[in-house]
Image (cartoon, coloured by chain):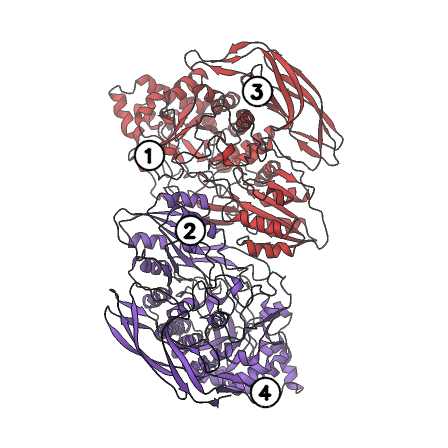
Chain colours: A purple, B red
Amino acid sequence: MTDDERLALLTSVMGANPMSPNRDPRIPPDVPMSAGYTPGVPRLGVPALLMSDASLGVTNPGYRPGDTATALPAGIALGASFDRELARTAGRMLGREARSRGFTVQLAGGINLARDPRNGRNFEYLSEDPLLSAVLAAESINGIQGEGVISTIKHFSLNCNETNRHWLDAVIDPAAHRESDLLAFEIAIERSQPGAVMTGYNKINGDYAGGNRVLIEDVLKGAWGYPGWVMSDWGATPDWEFALAGLDQESGAQMDSMMWQHQPFPENLPAAVADGRLPRARLSDMVRRILRSMYAVGIDTWAGDPAQTVTVDLDAHAQVALDTAREGIVVLANDGILPLAQQDGIRIAVIGGYAQTGVPTGTGSSAVTPPGGFAAVIKIGGPGIMGVGRNLYLFPSSPLAELRSALPHAHIEFDPGMSPAEAALMARRSDLVIVFGIRLEGEGFDLADLSLPWGQDAVIDAVAAANPNTVVVLETGNPVTMPWRDQVRAIVQAWYPGQLGGRAIADVLTGAVNPSGRLPVTFPASLDQTPRPELPGLGTPWGTPVEIHYDEGANVGYRWFAHHGHEPLFPFGHGLSYTTFDYSGLEVAGGDTVTASVTVTNTGDRRGADVPQLYLVEGPSTDRLRLLDFARVELDPGESRRIDFEADPRLLARYEGTTGQDGHWRIEGGLYRVAVSRSAGDHILEAEAPLHSRGFGR
Amino acid sequence: MTDDERLALLTSVMGANPMSPNRDPRIPPDVPMSAGYTPGVPRLGVPALLMSDASLGVTNPGYRPGDTATALPAGIALGASFDRELARTAGRMLGREARSRGFTVQLAGGINLARDPRNGRNFEYLSEDPLLSAVLAAESINGIQGEGVISTIKHFSLNCNETNRHWLDAVIDPAAHRESDLLAFEIAIERSQPGAVMTGYNKINGDYAGGNRVLIEDVLKGAWGYPGWVMSDWGATPDWEFALAGLDQESGAQMDSMMWQHQPFPENLPAAVADGRLPRARLSDMVRRILRSMYAVGIDTWAGDPAQTVTVDLDAHAQVALDTAREGIVVLANDGILPLAQQDGIRIAVIGGYAQTGVPTGTGSSAVTPPGGFAAVIKIGGPGIMGVGRNLYLFPSSPLAELRSALPHAHIEFDPGMSPAEAALMARRSDLVIVFGIRLEGEGFDLADLSLPWGQDAVIDAVAAANPNTVVVLETGNPVTMPWRDQVRAIVQAWYPGQLGGRAIADVLTGAVNPSGRLPVTFPASLDQTPRPELPGLGTPWGTPVEIHYDEGANVGYRWFAHHGHEPLFPFGHGLSYTTFDYSGLEVAGGDTVTASVTVTNTGDRRGADVPQLYLVEGPSTDRLRLLDFARVELDPGESRRIDFEADPRLLARYEGTTGQDGHWRIEGGLYRVAVSRSAGDHILEAEAPLHSRGFGR
């Protein structure tokens, strides 16, 4: 391999699209346009890297006219399913659709923990919990790579807020980092061997993620022995010296031109190799890591035109999107009004949320163009370079139409929910109101608060005052504050429910599907309960350096609430069913780690799925709350099943010392109190297991 | 002419469009699709009637793919100009564009008085005052008919609310009706001889407008001697017997099929003529009226293909749209912050109102597709058959882009105004905030209240609290309540400002244009001040019979406020300039009517236009407030001009008796106190004129 061939592997360039219509000459004519392209070495059989966004489907923000793909619900909806198998199936779908288009790399595996409920990109990720996030991300990556497509895992690490993300320094205690976000990466990488790790936009403890020697060299490649390659995020390589700190590939080089006025790797690495500033051994390492993942996943073995050889069953894939939405929907509150009764002539008002048109999705690089295209694209805009693409995308699955279809004997009217007074008029003349609350969230923007935008809280207030039989359906990517909580009879969190989201919502409301989603994030009563009531830097102009001190450390989400005794609006793990489940016969054992088993019984009158959760509630000298394991079990009425749990010992341990030096995990010897729980706030059965003191890992 | 030929003249049919794609076989293949078509009699040289909506431009809701037209601001913006010449010019533009497409009838001349600030169609009309509405409508109709195109005047009469308009009975004292809405029609028809009168959807005192013998036979054709034809509104002919009450033509027959399951005229008139239920004399009269207007306006003299023979200067027409917007914008409040100073590096936040995309227009049959198409069409929806077309249309004239262009040395950011907290963040870091408030109004819907929808009042509150230098720009078709009024430094009412509305707004804000608009409607402080704090029928389902008692009679708008001593938010006629005007030397004379003259002087330092208004403030035995005349005068700094006023005597009179029997106008003898005023609430110079007692007219 010549040096030119080797160096070319270290950069990906973006495809032409309507925003940037000139095709980069580095991309040959027969290559489909996408987020990134890196040439192969045909004479040596080294395949090119064709990279496509992202975790929720194969995106196409104008690269390939007319090319649509299956659009999954938000990642947080998958998180709410707590369903390993579903995550694997969704990953396979994603890999298959990527491969059919010739994409050898899917930029999936978004796993940043939801540390802050304002983070605009939480909808792309999975949860606030390291275990849940890691387990589901690993299944998804295994699904993708099982189709022979390289998956990334991203964004390494602590890209947990969007505010001025290019200038954001995420400050955290390194040990706490190992116990939280890094633990999620560690477990997921162990379980799925993603071909590449994508770094974040932000700094961590002063150094950019892409040039962070501690994280890349000491932790990822050192302590964990990660053999794949590390790529930057798009527009996140300001300096070529990042190569010296462990970055193997500059991504989307034109974005670096835009952000930093140069393309550091292609412009500087040749000279740096020539004059020795970049050691040849390091150059070899960079190339070897990329080649390794190509061969490990097998993109070198692809044969023929993928469009001909890779069949895609779009109906089956639509079913995956529908199943994810159905399993991800969380019924937060229900006084018995749900499921809706089939009732002749009942007058139902459907209000707001563009429910006559479709369902929203998150904005940014993860937005998939669904089959048939978007039902609507409403330009919202905002400050900074991300404002241009800040659109409210609606998928063409109308909850109104689906409800009309599911309730043929009801008389259903629609009010757009733009005015409290107008909405109340329809509510008053109806027997039942279903009011939708939506929120635009997405890449480049953090929420300023957790309220519903466009005056929707006032609409819900007015509607609930006009009609006591009000059901609220939320379609958001983050927790919502609910000033109207006690005025309504049911609250359903549907997240961004994907291309068949309207159908899934109607299925849950009418009981065609028994809800089984559980919150993968804590819903705070207010931002005052969270680690940062004020978000540093929020509202500063684009380009302002921002420091966010993640002083909660490893106490992310429910752990923080437990530690401080805050009563959340709804706890992590919470979600209602139309049947009831009983737990009995808890048995636990200790030793190196905690194992447990419990019997789950469906004590209600309809089939449904439950998500029993095993928590550490108290260690020998501390009240740490940790999700240790979880299951998802579907049971007929009266049916019981025995569930076995086993804790990853790192969840019972603390990280001590410094990674790359004396760092290791340590379990303190003593009695560990664990619980089988309905949620982080509702522990049903408790027992104690003795663990012996030990250190392990690094 | 055969009976078949005659009967065919009495119906118009709608063109094919995407909502109703089957072309009616009564429309020959070479006819452009539009709102209505009536065949001519080629062998006799009788031309066909090709009818197009409406008052604000030649519309194309899908009839003719790709055909766009000059999109004027809302009618209420033209009303705010108080500019006769502009109305004439706008009418000529409209006639020319209609004619170039072969349309022989323009369904313009909307003149219903703004009796209720919730009426969804007020934006299409002109004002709450009979004189102002009549004068401007007449100029507009004269402009249209001056281009050889028949204009309607509409909707005869009292179609002043949209709520269940097909089942709305407008109840009013007949004499008061003559002094208000009917007086507007009377004066406008005298001054412009529109070829046709279109009736309303509603009933008046129990009888549908289209079948209202009192209004059509006694008033319009009787007392006023109207020689043209009377057509129904589309879908407003439930019965063929309306022909016996004076209706000459059923419009848009397919809409009657949809509404009433039959087409009364084509299905019933042949038999009714044959068996004498429709007298042959009446049939002749119906036909003669249509033919008369064809020949009076001259559509029989058109020669050649209009697309070839009628040139359209789109640049000149765009200028008409721009001029109308500039003259229609009303500066309601200004503490001196306007016009905006050119200031290097000033940080300006533009917030809300889709200002990055364009400007809104009203929804319904008047919505014109502008050159280049809409910038956005956001489906809003709502109950009933009008919900489907209830869209937020945005014209592609972005206030944000125009402000950036007009203020090149400013740093201007945009926030979408969806969240109070988010908007406040940008407001806080800016030197100045321009926040837009928009509202969707349109055909088929009355407003439930006068607040701004989508939570915009809360956004303005938050923004004004975050930054004291806040300017509010409103784009609505009706008055707005302003809970934030005293927290902001300026308030600008831009209405729906048409295809160059963003430019006009920037021109006024920056002082490139000195504002001269005056309110053509009273802005109430709350609905409690209006004749109907509760709007009857609001919120009842589609199809519910509604009675609205217009008990205010002739005391519409400012007359009502004066009569009851209510202090409005902003009075009729109010509007600020960037210069100042002084009135002096008022002279009045009486006799048969009041004449007056006054000197207007520009006492400020920039050229500007003033609108001096002459009001009757007190009659011999009553405190009636009546706009008697108005002028619009443009003056250089220091320049003076003498203005002459003359009152239409009907404005000084009361109507007595019953139209068609003993009815007549009567002026009570005595002293009439008049004022030259800046607005209905700000009388500057007063004087008295003696009138002698007399009766006149019928």
The reply to whether label 4 and label 1 mark residues of one chain is no
At mark 2, the secondary structure is loop
> Is A26 drawn above or below residue B99 in the view shown?
below
Kindly identify the residue that appears in the image at 53 percent across and 22 percent down: B191
Residue B680 percent coordinates (x, y): 60, 28
Q: Do the numbered discs 4 and 1 sit on residues whose CB atoms are within 8 Å? A: no
In terms of sequence position, does the residue under pointer 2 or pointer 4 come before the other?
A: 4
In the image, what residue type sits under mark 2? Gly
Q: Do the numbered discs 4 and 3 sit on residues whose CB atoms are within 8 Å? A: no
- Mark 1: few/some/many CA within 10 Å (<14, 14-19, 20+): many
Q: Do the numbered discs 1 and 3 sit on residues whose CB atoms are within 8 Å? A: no
Left or right side of A67 for A287: right
- Mark 4: few/some/many CA within 10 Å (<14, 14-19, 20+): some
The part of the image, by quadrant, that contains residue A158 is bottom right
In the image, what residue type sits under mark 3? Asp
Q: How far apart are marks 4 and 3 (CA)?
A: 95 Å
Q: Mark 2 points at which residue?
A: A352
Q: Distance between the residues labelled 1 and 3?
A: 46 Å
Q: Mark 1 points at which residue?
A: B256
Q: Name the residue under label 4.
A: A282
- Mark 3: few/some/many CA within 10 Å (<14, 14-19, 20+): some
In the image, what residue type sits under mark 1? Asp
At mark 4, the secondary structure is helix
The reply to whether label 1 and label 3 mark residues of one chain is yes
Residue B381 visible here: yes
Q: Mark 3 points at which residue?
A: B623
Of marks 4 and 3, the one in the foreground: 3
Kindly identify the residue that appears in the image at 61 percent across and 11 percent down: B591
